[in-house]
Amino acid sequence: MTPQTFNFQGEKIPIKHQVHRRYKNIHLHVRPDHILIKSPKVAHHHVQRMLQENSLWIEEKLQHQQEVTQRLPEQAFYFGDALPIDYGFAGPRLNGGQIHLPFCDNRTEVLAHLKVFYGEEGRRYLPDRLAYWSDRMELYPKQIRLKYLKSRWGSCSSRGNINLNYRAVQLPMAAIDAILIHELAHLEHMNHGPAFWALVHHFCPQYAHYHQYTKQLGPQLV
């Protein structure tokens, strides 16, 4: 019978065994929180022998992955909350108050997965929220585009098109609303004159507070 755990530095690492006829050989995969074996239907002693023969390699992989995980970001912002990142899962996705990401070898991979996550969340949330404020302000863009922008949270063109930065889903919802109201107000006033700011502050009296908060938090965001 396939062992249930692998002993590593006094810790029992779970072993999972997937059996399927499409597998031609025994494949061994080491994950941060488990060891995965994929194989056709074979005698258990073959699996046992493979684990024994590769025990040093398994220990090296587990050690390396633990060291890498300790260097990776432990949390990421989501609607203003710093949520823990849990590595080694199918993702990226939100689950149980955590951001689940696949195992990553470096920060570059983490950032790439987080950009995918924020892009999906931005497409889910931002257009609907912009529509909400459009109805309240009675100002409607001709077109909405979501982009990854490093230095701007949004923009409004003279043609009435609004671009939104999907990175904004890292901000608190009230700060996101301030951005949306700002861009919609440009549909009425393509400048930053008194009439523009009067319109912005009518719908967002605390705009200056949220703008400053966003400015301070920005460097910490992906």
Image (cartoon, rainbow, N blue to C red):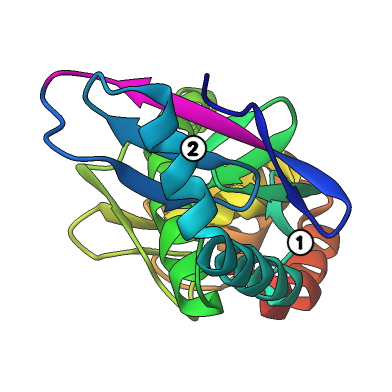
In the figure, 220 relative to 21: above or below?
below
- SS type, badge 1: loop
Q: In front of the other: label 2 or label 1? A: 2
Q: Does the magenta stretch include residue 15?
A: yes
In the figure, 6 relative to 55: above or below?
above
Residue 138 in view in this figure: no
- Write down the region rendered in magenta: 14-21
Q: Earlier in the sequence, mark 2 or mark 1?
A: 2
Residue shown at the point (50%, 81%) measured from the top left: 151
Quarter the C terminus occupies: bottom right
* Residue 46 picture location, percent across and down: 36, 35
Query: How far apart are the two marked residues, 2 and 1, measured between alpha carbons?
Result: 35 Å
Residue shown at the point (79%, 59%) measured from the top left: 210
* Residue 114 picture location, percent across and down: 50, 57
Q: Which of 26 and 135 is in front in this view?
A: 26
In the figure, 164 relative to 194: above or below?
above
Residue 66, located in which quarter of the rendered image?
bottom right
Amino acid beneath label 1: Glu
What predominant SS class does the magenta segment belong to? strand
Which residue is label 1 attached to?
74
Q: Indicate which disc residue 48 carries.
A: 2
